[in-house]
Amino acid sequence: MLNPLGPVIDILPHLIQEVRLVWQPLARGNMEDKMNQDEHIRNDIQEEITWDPRVKSTDIGVTCKGGAVRLTGSVASYSERLAAENAAKRVKGVHAIAEDIEIKLPSGNVETDESIAEHISKLMKWNTMVPVPDVQAEVRNGFVTLTGEVDWNFERETIKNQVAHLGGVRGIDNRITLQNRVSEKDVSKSITRALHRNADLEKSKVDVCVDGSKVTITGYVKALYEKELIENAVWAAPGVMQVIDRLRVS
């Protein structure tokens, strides 16, 4: 008795071979496109870092795979490391950054924990932008832990950024909390208006969900720096104490 599937079985190897002949070039083409895109992103990051005058080091390495970037090398200060990371965030196509830059303080210019603490104390005393009576700083081996309570997120970030520029600082753990001063009644409306006022963000596809003092933002942006702009706009709304950022770079 003849097998009705016989003809199909006979031509099956030929069909598989034809599919392979069509698929393999397409797969190679897609892989080559991704490799070229990663190389383009890597080159753009290197150029952006070189362009930024705050980054003086020429010892920063950049690798990129699928939009995920890794920064390596060494710099002379914590603020320079932040500048290199922010330069990478500004580049289109960057989806995530792993920052492994080492801080190598200049020889003969090593600050003790005591001297760093003194500088921070003076910094807070002369700070005219942020009232800091309830903020404390602890320094261990050049790593600073900030604690206390302030009214606004910009105050928390201002303190961190100013400490970041002090000599001898190797890292900062910002544990400053915010006071809950208002209800959630107009928080969503305030955030939406703020996003629409910003020329860089008015076309962004962002959804805002407010739950008490917690705000969750979802949607798509074109670059990492837009994520930061949106997050900063959300933090500027009165009453926001927590921001969950679920934005994705398209």
Image: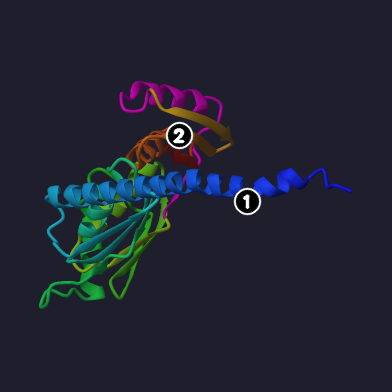
| Residue drawn at the location 30% of the way across and 76% of the way down | 141
- Label 1 packing within 10 angstroms: few (<14), some (14-19), many (20+): few
Up the image or down, 120 lies above or below 155; here it is below
Q: Position of residue 177 (x, y in %)?
A: 45, 51
The answer to whether residue 198 is above or below residue 234 is: above
Number of labelled discs? 2
Seen at 13% across and 62% down, the residue is 58
Q: Residues within 10 Å of mark 2 (few under 14, many from 20)?
A: some
Checking the image for residue 13, the label placed there is 1
Between circles 2 and 1, the one closer to the viewer is: 1
Confirm whether the magenta stretch covers residue 192: yes
Q: Which mark is residue 24?
A: none
Q: Relative to the observer, which residue lies in front, 68 or 155?
A: 68
Q: Identify the mark nearer the N-term, 2 or 1.
A: 1
Is residue 219 at all visible to an observer of this figure?
Answer: yes
| Residue 124 seen in render | no
Residue tagged 2:
220
Q: For the residue marked with disc 2, what is the amino acid?
A: Tyr
Residue span colored magenta: 176-202
Single out the residue that lies furthest toward the front: 1
Is 31 a magenta residue? no
Residue 227 or 19: which is nearer the viewer? 19
